[in-house]
Amino acid sequence: MTLVELVAVLLVLVVLSALALPKLRDLGTDARIAAVNALAASVHSATQKVKLALDAKGLSTSASAHTFLQTDGQAYVRIWKGYPDRWWDGIGITQVAANTTISNYGSAAPVVYDQFTFYGFGGPLGNAGWVVTHAPTPTQCSVQYVFDGSGEPAIVVTTRGC
C-alpha cells in the first residue's frame, strides 16, 4: 500500500466517523425521551387503575382524609381524594418494580427508581415526579405528577433537557 492510499483510507475513516458521531450522541437523547414518555404513560395508567379499583370497592373518592388501597395483593398505595397521593408511598409505588418498603410521606427526599430519581411534592420539580438523573438537565427531562386534591392529576412531560 502506498502512502497516498493510506492517506485516502484515513481520510475516508475520518469523514465517516464525523458523520456517525452526532448520530450516536442523538441515540442517547432519543433513549431518554422514550424512557420519559414510557414512564408518563405508566403513571397515567396507574392513576386510572387506582381510580377504577376505588370505584369497584365502593370507596369514597372525595374524602379529604388519606386512606390506603392495596394493589394486586402487594403494595398499599396512599390515596388522597380518589387518586394516588403525591409521595413515594402514593404515586411512586404504583410503578412496576418500585421499592414498596420506603415511606417518605411529607418528605421531598429522593428515591432512586431505575434510571429515574423520584421526588415527592416540593422537590426540585415543585410537584411530585421523576427526573432522569443522567440527563444533561435532569429537571428538564422529567415526568411531573401534579395533583392538589381537586380534579384529576395532571401528568406533565418535559424533554427539553434530555
Image (spheres, grey):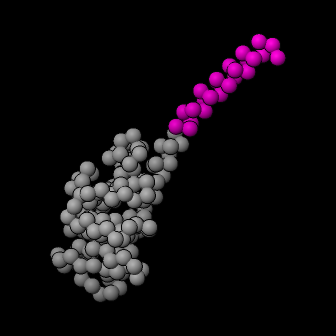
Residue at image position (21%, 76%) is 66
Q: How many marks?
A: 0
Q: Is residue 13 magenta?
A: yes
Q: Is residue 17 visible?
A: yes
Res. 91 visible in picture: no
Q: Quadrant of the N terminus?
A: top right
Q: Among all residues in the image, which is located at the extreme front?
A: 101
Residue 34: horizontal and vertical position, in percent? Answer: 48, 52
Position of residue 75 measured from the top left corner of the image (x, y, whole percent): 36, 76
Which residue appears at 78% of the width and 16% of the height?
Answer: 5
Query: In the rendered structure, which segment of residues is drawn in magenta?
Result: 1-25
Q: Quadrant of residue 116?
A: bottom left
Please, which residue is most extreme toward the left here? 64
Q: Is residue 158 above or below residue 87?
A: above
Q: Quadrant of residue 111?
A: bottom left
- Quadrant in which residue 93 is drawn: bottom left
Quarter that holds the C terminus: top left
Residue drawn at (27%, 85%) of the image: 59
Give 115 or 84, whichever is nearer the viewer. 115
Q: Is residue 2 magenta?
A: yes
Q: Give the residue drawn at x 24%, y 54%.
A: 123
Residue 32: % across, % down: 46, 48
